Amino acid sequence: MSGSDEEIYAVADFCLIPMGTGEPSVGPYIAECHRVLEKSGLTFKVRGYGTNLEGPWDAVCAAIGDCHLAVHKQGAPRIATDIRIGTRTDKVLAPGTGNESKLRRVQEILAADKKE
Amino acid sequence: MSGSDEEIYAVADFCLIPMGTGEPSVGPYIAECHRVLEKSGLTFKVRGYGTNLEGPWDAVCAAIGDCHLAVHKQGAPRIATDIRIGTRTDKVLAPGTGNESKLRRVQEILAADKKE
Amino acid sequence: MSGSDEEIYAVADFCLIPMGTGEPSVGPYIAECHRVLEKSGLTFKVRGYGTNLEGPWDAVCAAIGDCHLAVHKQGAPRIATDIRIGTRTDKVLAPGTGNESKLRRVQEILAADKKE
Amino acid sequence: MSGSDEEIYAVADFCLIPMGTGEPSVGPYIAECHRVLEKSGLTFKVRGYGTNLEGPWDAVCAAIGDCHLAVHKQGAPRIATDIRIGTRTDKVLAPGTGNESKLRRVQEILAADKKE
């Protein structure tokens, strides 16, 4: 972030949409994003409608920007991305566990339903 | 939809945020949404940062609205939800396969990388 | 909503992205959405990166669905929309004032900054 | 962006949601974001359901991250933000005109409707 020594851990999920490509399929572009994210070293997971990604705020944003550059190079003249990004100061997340731990908490609550 | 006989199949992913709850945890609210969605009969999957949901447009929107009603009943005075929702006319999706098939296509492309 | 007599007022903002259109411009599609929303009778406002829309939950969702149908008819084979939608039980909004009142509140706080 | 000399111009709109604050109002937090964005030097506009923001990719992301830091300092233990962010290579935008020019294009098309 600008002019700050503080760094904050971000848990994100983004959905990148190539525009003006002449065909409705996005698989090849999302696959290219997968390759870019592998190089980033961040924890990520491609899903059905978006990609989970987490790490330091600046690194997460830079990785998504690198996906834009790569998808433009593949020929998409325009890209619209939706990013959900969260931060918290009430607990420290072990790096790479943010998205998983949110899901696990919900599963624990639902498992308790069945025991009752 | 209003004044229309047309029905369109929607593949969605939504992230519901309870506000003004006095505590940062959302697990119990998301678990409640899970219970609501089970009753809807729609195909859905709770994930780390959002819930996949698909079905006829009106049914998908109604199910998310029912989640809002349920979470208000749990005590959240305000809710903000982000919904990604997609439709297509270029191919017919077998009901319940939209999110899975998008993911499978990306995995196939990446698997081909490794064979080369 | 399904199986419920309750109706809830929703304040929303949506951004519709036509895909596979062969050209990066979206102006004609967004203009078509404007025509659809005018027929809906709901309060709305097209902005730079999204359209404000508010009204009963079902009517808001139906209007956005009608935009999808209209944009498919214009030739877009696939559409991805991002919807932000909020509801609250802590206060009653005069119909059509939700987005405006949120903005006014922020402006009042900032105006007080200048008086200090 | 990481390991790249390329810089890309981004047109964005973000909606920041403070969580666990004990009250449903967000006005004071959004006003604080306004103060942060003024310091950023970027072109921005607070609206009803989100804030338009544009500039170089890294600067846009850094400014939103600075909003998170400031809102955490105000006492919000958790924040969830939805960011819509777009880039294009088919035309060069004069800095600060991206969101406005998208809106103007739609207005021109609609104005032509009335002339017919």
Image (spheres, coloured by chain):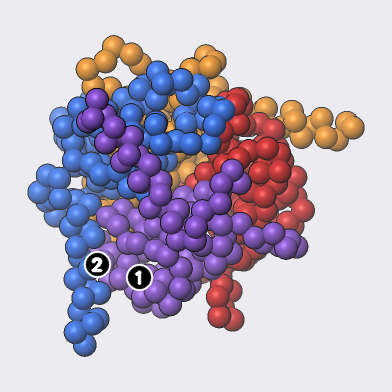
Chain colours: A red, B orange, C blue, D purple
What residue sits 69% from the left and 59% below the top? D6
Image vertical order of residue B9 relative to residue D59, above or below: above
**Quarter of the figure with the N terminus of chain D:** bottom right
Give percent across and percent down for residue B13: 46, 37
Crowd tier of the residue under label 1, counting other residues whose Cα lies within 10 Å: few below 14, some 14–19, many 20 or above? many
Q: Are marks 2 and 1 on the same chain?
A: no
* Kind of residue at badge 2: Val
**Quarter of the figure with the C terminus of chain D:** top left
Q: Which residue is mark 1?
A: D34
What residue sits 47% from the left and 31% below the top? C18
Quick check: can you spot residue B100? no
Quick check: can you spot residue B110? yes
Which of D19 and D2 lies nearest the eye of the viewer? D2
What residue sits 76% from the left and 34% below the top? B110
D78 lies left or right of D5 = left
CA gap between label 2 and label 1 equals: 9 Å
Q: Which residue is mark 2?
A: C106
